[in-house]
Image (tube, rainbow, N blue to C red):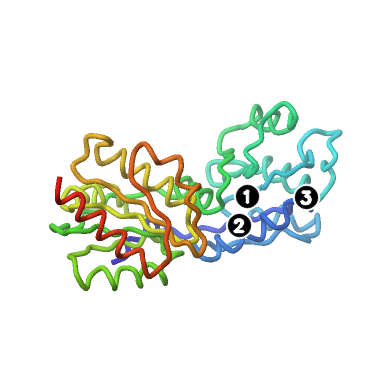
Amino acid sequence: MFINLYNKMFTVFLAAVSPDMDDTRQELTFVLENAGIKSIDGKGLPADKIDLALQSADCSIHVLGKSDIYTHDGDGYNTPAGVQFRAAKNLCNDSFKMLVWNPSGDDSNASSYINNIRREIIENTFYTDKQSPIVFVEDIRNIMNIKQSESRHHEPTDIFFLYNELDNDTAIGVYSMLKDFQQVQKLGISMSSDVDYNTYITEQLADSKIGVVYYNFAGDWAVSFARQIWKDSGGNSSQTPILIVGNSNHAKIEDLAVLKDIMQSSVNEQLRIPLDIKVFLDKQLKK
């Protein structure tokens, strides 16, 4: 079963960037496409076409790099990125939002122009320094949509298996092996619906012996998501222990260090992950 988090369609204007952010912009483009978000490409857009392109979108995305595209004497002021940044800011209103992303997370004095941007945040303008494009796109979804609660059936099970749709192929492989010897409820988290899935997850976790958050590519999302559902289900007082497990094709155990005090984690080869989950389940049943 998939729960789509949002289904309101909207279009983003993806602004030009400074050369040092080309790779980051390309990665963001890939995530937007996989999330089913329509975008208007601002790269190479003539100056006289900018306003029309912005008016055709519901929001704009501006990726901050090393160049100052904000202050009048900044090194990127008259670049396409700078021109589009200011044009979007002038357009901000209740029906158009401006999303400013600083993926470096750097807001120190060494990047004073970023501090200037943060001080000048106005209504309908949003700033974030989350480093993961997947988490950033989720933030965009939250900003651009109003989620509606929906009641879903939950039932007792051994394992509640959760994953991001970006990891669907390998996640289904793990699930298929698990269901051969345990009761499993699976939930793929998609990035395209207006359903508030929090209530369902909390209720299904309470009806499960363990919860498992699996990931391969979507590591940043998985860490943030696992921490949130742990908190929502009662934190240390929760009756359902949670395991976060990464596929060693792309996952690294050091990525999970931030969760070591609140839940068990592991990184292993695809074929060994079901066994890790079974061992974790058996350990919990013996308590």
Choose the circle earlier in sequence order: 3 or 2. Answer: 3
Circle 3 or circle 1, nearest the eye: 3
- Return the x and y of residue 92 as percentages of the image width and height: 61, 41
The front one of 131 and 6 is 131
Q: Assess whether mark 1 and mark 2 are in contact (beta carbons under 8 angstroms).
A: yes
The front one of 22 and 58 is 22
Choose the circle earlier in sequence order: 2 or 1. Answer: 2
List the residue tagged with mark 3: 18
Is residue 125 in view? no
- Tell me the distance, in whole angstroms, between the alpha carbons under discs 3 and 1: 13 Å
Amino acid type shown at disc 3: Ser
Asked which secondary structure carries label 1, the reply is strand
Circle 2 or circle 1, nearest the eye: 2
List the residue tagged with mark 2: 28
Quadrant of the drawing holding the C terminus: top left
Asked which secondary structure carries label 3, the reply is loop
- Return the x and y of residue 265 as percentages of the image width and height: 37, 49
Asked which secondary structure carries label 2, the reply is helix
Indicate which disc residue 61 carries. Answer: 1
Is residue 123 in view? yes
